[in-house]
Image (tube, rainbow, N blue to C red):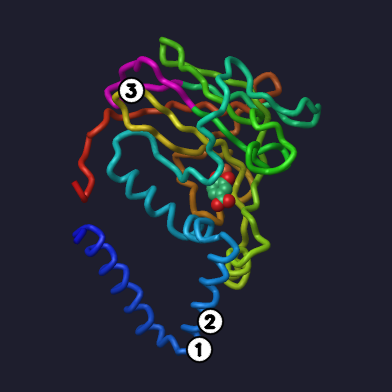
């Protein structure tokens, strides 16, 4: 017997039962929903469907319990085997890919500089794809691990990501469309900030004024994650001051 599992499953079942009752769900609607869920599983979209509707809530709970920077959804495209990069992510070398400079600092919640900090950075190609997952992009492009300098600063050059359409040709996309929604995410850059003795911060930052910033299909945007429109020497600048917290600043509900 696992009390946490019992508590959570009982609560989920009660919540769903209440909706079935309040919305007066018919047997035919119930069967339509069952067939839909079977199709989601068959087509390998269980994680996608749950991520679209539920992941941002789990992240919001984490945000509420954290005293560091705002976390965000991880999405499916992190790779732990990304190369170390010094100054610049590897990108396609094409003139019309707009340059982006990502820079900033990493500090502890008490304002201190932290030793041995690594930042994983990953983002889409200018065609809205992710290396290592979508075909035809070298797996070390558009991603890498940065070592933060002893003074807490970091900087890396890359090119601008674009708005990203989650897979929309399966049952998840069909449901979003049936609900009058869409399957677009605003352009974003993913980060994972790691340091010994500190909670890992997984987050994403967005661009002020970008398409879909106010209407993300994954509901992943918080205002503190939108970076202002700043350009220096022809490059869009994303300036970020990460704050991370020591491990065990709070205990989980199951501990
Ligand atoms: C998905 C893709 C992303 O790039 C992301 O940041 C979040 C979610 C997705 O396909 O579900
Ligand atoms: Fe993403």
Q: Is residue 214 visible?
A: no
Task: Please tell me whether residue 107 belongs to the stretch shown in magenta.
Answer: yes
Image height of 77 relative to 151, above or below: below
Lower position in the chain sequence, tag 3 or tag 2: 2
Say above or below: 219 vs 105: below
Residue 165's label in the rendered image is none
Tell me which corner region of the image, top left, top right, bottom left or bottom right, holds residue 2. Answer: bottom left
**In the current view of this chain or complex, which residue is farthest to the front?**
1
Residue 151: image x %, image y %? Answer: 41, 11
Which residue occupies 50% across, 78% down? 33
Mark 2 packing: few (<14 Cα in 10 Å), some, or many (20+)? few
Whether the residues at callouts 2 and 1 have beta carbons within 8 Å, the answer is: yes
Is 193 part of what is drawn in magenta? no
Please tell me which residue is depicted at 54% across the width and 77% down the height of the picture.
35
Secondary structure of residue under mark 1: helix
Q: Secondary structure at mark 2?
A: helix
Residue at numbered disc 2: 32
Q: Which residue is mark 1?
A: 28
Image coordinates of residue 149 in percent, x first then y, are: 46, 12
Q: Which of 136/123 is in front?
A: 136
Q: Quadrant of residue 62?
A: top left
Q: 61 left or right of 221?
A: left
Q: Which residues are magenta?
A: 105-119
Q: Identify which residue is drawn at 39% across, 16% down.
A: 116
23 versus 203 height, above or below: below
Q: Which residue is mark 3?
A: 196
209 is higher (above) or lower (below) than 51: above
Neighbours of disc 1 within 10 Å: few (<14), some (14-19), many (20+): few
In the displayed image of the protein, which residue is found farthest to the top?
Answer: 150
* Residue at image location 22% in from the left, 63% down from the top: 7
Q: CA distance from mark 2 to mark 1?
A: 6 Å
Label 3 and label 2: CA atoms lie apart by: 49 Å
């Amino acid at each position: 017997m696992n009390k946490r599992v019992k508590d959570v499953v009982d609560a989920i079942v009660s919540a769903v039962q209440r909706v079935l009752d309040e919305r007066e769900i018919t047997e035919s609607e119930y069967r339509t929903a069952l067939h839909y869920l079977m199709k989601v599983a068959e087509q390998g979209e269980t994680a996608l469907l749950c991520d679209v509707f539920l992941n941002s809530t789990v992240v919001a709970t984490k945000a509420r319990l954290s005293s560091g920077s705002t976390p965000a959804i991880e999405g499916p495209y992190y790779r732990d085997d990304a190369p170390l990069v010094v100054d610049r992510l590897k990108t396609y070398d094409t003139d019309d890919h707009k340059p982006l400079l990502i820079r900033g600092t990493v500090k502890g919640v008490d304002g201190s500089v932290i030793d041995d900090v690594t930042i994983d950075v990953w983002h889409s190609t200018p065609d809205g794809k992710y290396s290592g997952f979508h075909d035809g992009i070298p797996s070390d492009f558009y991603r890498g691990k940065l070592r933060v300098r002893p003074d807490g600063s970091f900087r890396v050059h890359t090119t601008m990501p674009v708005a990203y359409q989650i897979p929309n040709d399966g049952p998840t996309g069909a449901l979003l469309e049936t609900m009058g929604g869409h399957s677009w995410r605003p352009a974003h850059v993913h980060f994972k900030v790691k340091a010994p003795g500190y909670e890992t911060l997984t987050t994403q930052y967005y661009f002020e004024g970008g398409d879909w910033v106010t209407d993300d299909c994954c509901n992943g945007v918080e205002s503190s994650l939108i970076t202002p429109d700043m350009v220096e020497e022809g490059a869009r600048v994303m300036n970020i001051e990460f704050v991370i917290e020591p491990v065990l600043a709070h205990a989980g509900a199951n501990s």
